[in-house]
Image (cartoon, helix red, strand yellow):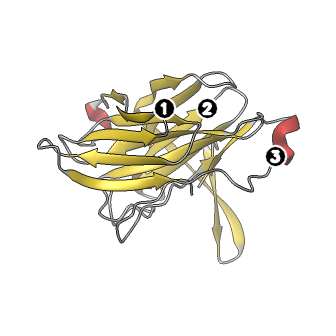
Amino acid sequence: MRLRSSRPGAQRLAAAAALGAIVSLALAGQALSYPVQHLPPGRVTLASVKTVQGPVLIMLHRIRYLGKVALCMSESNGSGTGQSCANYPLGPDSNQPIGNDPVWWTTYVGVCTPHHFQVISGVVLRAGLTAWLRTPGGLSRMPTTTVPKAFDVAGGLVYALIASYPATVTLRDATGKSVYTAPVEPLTDVPTVQCGSVRSSVYA
């Protein structure tokens, strides 16, 4: 994980490979495969982030898997794609450690450049919150994109390119009060063995 809440029950960024129509599940030490049903409105691209490795697209789609409906957040730069899926309702009972945090994060890690970077993206789970990013360059509001109603979340999608540290994300309510703060962890000891074929990865 590259982003952690400073509050108890901190959510971890989680990721899985993009698996098309099949998801592999390790159960009792044995790998089993189950079909995935893709649900409307299909895969929707909500944002594109410019990076030194080209644009990173942030997408949402829904699936039904093992009888449960999940929201999947995907990041792709064309040569490498990763996704993280969380069961509805998004929160403590999802299959991700979201807990009671007001946002569900994932991150795209670019490691095959002289200066590593991250693209962080989060689905805001409460209405009326704004996201702010503090870096050595100062404080700025994070870009926000409206999430289609079909995805059944209360807030929008927030995202940012992280290329310098320290970096901290804060969510504020309509009164300006901080309701969530999390530092973005610097990239250290990230393997680059895949850089000959796949330039980037999504990490939990």
Does residue 79 show up? Answer: yes
Circle 1 sits on which residue? 59
**Residue at point 36% right, 43% down?**
123
Mark 3 to mark 1: distance in Å?
Answer: 25 Å
Q: Is residue 93 left or right of residue 176?
A: right
Q: Secondary structure at mark 2?
A: strand
Left or right: residue 53 versus residue 121 is: right
Going by the numbered disc 1, the residue's amino acid type is Met
* Residue holding disc 2: 76
Disc sitting over residue 19 in the figure: none
Q: Position of residue 198 (x, y in %)?
A: 79, 36
Q: Amino acid at mark 3?
A: Thr
User: Residue 54, relative to residue 122: is it above or below?
Assistant: above
Give the mark count: 3
Q: Disc 3 vs disc 1: which is toward the camera?
A: 3
**Badge 1 vs badge 2, beta-carbon distance below 8 Å:** yes
Q: Can you identify the residue that label 3 sits on?
A: 192
Quadrant location of the C terminus?
bottom right
- What is the spatial separation of the Cα atoms under label 2 and label 3, in whole angstroms? 18 Å
In terms of depth relative to the viewer, which is nearer, 148 or 42?
A: 148
- In this orientation, does residue 87 appear? no
Tags 2 and 3 touching, CB below 8 Å: no
Q: Nearer the viewer, residue 170 or 36?
A: 170
Dots 3 and 1: beta carbons under 8 Å? no
Eye-nearest disc, 2 or 3? 3
Residue 14: percent from left, percent from top = 54, 55
Q: Earlier in the sequence, mark 3 or mark 1?
A: 1
Looking at the image, tell me whether mark 1 or mark 2 is earlier in sequence order.
1
Front-lying residue, 53 or 59: 53
- Amino acid type at circle 2 is Ser
